[in-house]
Image (cartoon, grey):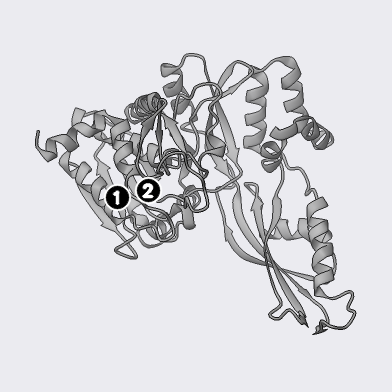
Amino acid sequence: MTQTAELRALHERPVELLRTLLRYDTTNPPGNESECIEFVRRLLEAAGCETEIYARDPGRPNLISRLEGAGDAPPLLLYGHVDVVTTEGQSWSVPPFEARIQDGFVWGRGALDMKSGVAMLLCAFLKAKLAGTRLPGDVILAVVSDEENLGDWGAGFLVERHPELFAGVRYALGEVGGSTMHLEGVRFYPIEVAQKQVCWTKATLHGRGGHAAMPFRGGAMAKLGRLLGSLDRARLPVHVTTVVERELETMAAALPTRRAGALRALLDPATTNRALRRLGRRAPAFEAILRNTVNATIVRGGHKVNVIPAEIELELDCRLLPGFGPDDLLAELEPVVGDGVELEIVRHDPGLPEPDFGLFETLSEALRRLDPEAVPLPVLIGGVTDGRYFARLGIQTYGFLPLRLPEGFIPLGLAHGADERVPVDSLDFGVEAIFSVLERFGDA
């Protein structure tokens, strides 16, 4: 078999395609995604797909390919990133870039986040091309760099410099969502329809400086201590957004009465805190989608051990719910931080104020065809993805990279951790679900 024929056949073996992608060390920083992207380009062109490369830096390329549709629906965007986070300081059971199959899993950095997703998108895209599938509209595939380090060289660059590539697109499929979540005997399939917004903030504290050999009280360091204590105790106001109300009501309707009551109690600000206390270790995941949040992450101040600093900067990772903006955050933070603290917004990456559910039922039907007991679940995620960039073009992203996961396998703690892995038999499910959407997205 020729190399071209081997590449053409690879789309029928998503596990082998994933293993090939995993063997490229695309740890970001620095990324070095070019060899991996070049492999994807060769794979697509072997199947007769035209490709284009767009890059701010040749070592950080982004690939675009397009299949022509019937013109009955707006173009659909599929996108995914090939860079991965570091393995430094982690203790792995297997080499993280070997792509070993062991115990029924494919192991490696990126197996979940998100080279398995890229493999599934590629397989569905290539299947549509090689089978001559009648697509309702054009399908655009974007394979990008740099998502794990803010995306400024990847999706951010494409949206800023080449928005014409996505003209007319209304919906996109990307990370995070679509994989099985087992709860009380129910198989939920969370589909991300919204995400919180990055709103990084800097707090500056001032005080009298001086010689550290002298007794000193009430300076910037003391103010920092009080501020950190206030932030640790603070609970910003509860806000029930449209998507979270739909998410929790969908879960409650499928669960036993006792669990349903606890979830519905989260939706009433008068009972939210009491309900969260009852949720135990699950509470942080729910609290994150009911509040704007703030966490102190970096402190800068002082240059010599014998000098009392007169100024200290504290960086705050703040995340906003959909529909909220920086002014809303400052209004909630100022009573917490008190007088004498300067707050400055450093970076705000806005998203869509309200989700567009227009494609949700099409995605749900794709899941139910493969798993008749599936309960599709719209969700708000507490993190961010490249979807925030495409939102600037009015594009609604759905986190839809389905994996049929066995009960007891919880991917959340593995995605950026040691021994990241994905079940071997879960990828075919995802390819079929995505391909079903490609055939039917004109129904939206």
Crowd band around label 1 with a 10 angstrom C-alpha radius: few (<14), some (14–19), many (20+): many
Residue type, mark 1 in image? Cys
Residue type, mark 2 in image? Val
Q: Which residue is mark 1?
A: 36
SS assignment at label 1: helix
Q: Residue most toward the bottom?
A: 211
Which of 234 and 306 lies nearest the eye of the viewer? 306
* Left or right placement of residue 203 versus residue 274 in this view: left
Crowd band around label 2 with a 10 angstrom C-alpha radius: few (<14), some (14–19), many (20+): many
Q: What is the quadrant of the C terminus in the image?
A: top left
- x 39%, y 37%: residue: 116
Q: Which mark is residue 71?
A: none
- x 72%, y 21%: residue: 260
Q: Is residue 65 visible?
A: yes
> Does residue 39 lie above or below 186 as drawn?
below
Q: What is the quadrant of the N terminus in the image?
A: top left
- x 28%, y 31%: residue: 135
Q: Which residue is mark 2?
A: 82
- x 27%, y 29%: residue: 13
Task: Measure the alpha-carbon separation of dots 1 and 2.
Answer: 7 Å
Which of 255 and 243 lies nearest the eye of the viewer? 255
* Left or right placement of residue 139 versus residue 160 in this view: left
* Left or right placement of residue 274 versus residue 51 in this view: right
Q: Residue most toward the left?
A: 2
> Does residue 76 lie above or below 131 as drawn?
below
Q: Is residue 267 visible?
A: no
SS assignment at label 2: loop
Tell me how many marks there are: 2
> Does residue 432 lie above or below 146 as drawn?
above
* Left or right placement of residue 77 versus residue 292 in this view: left
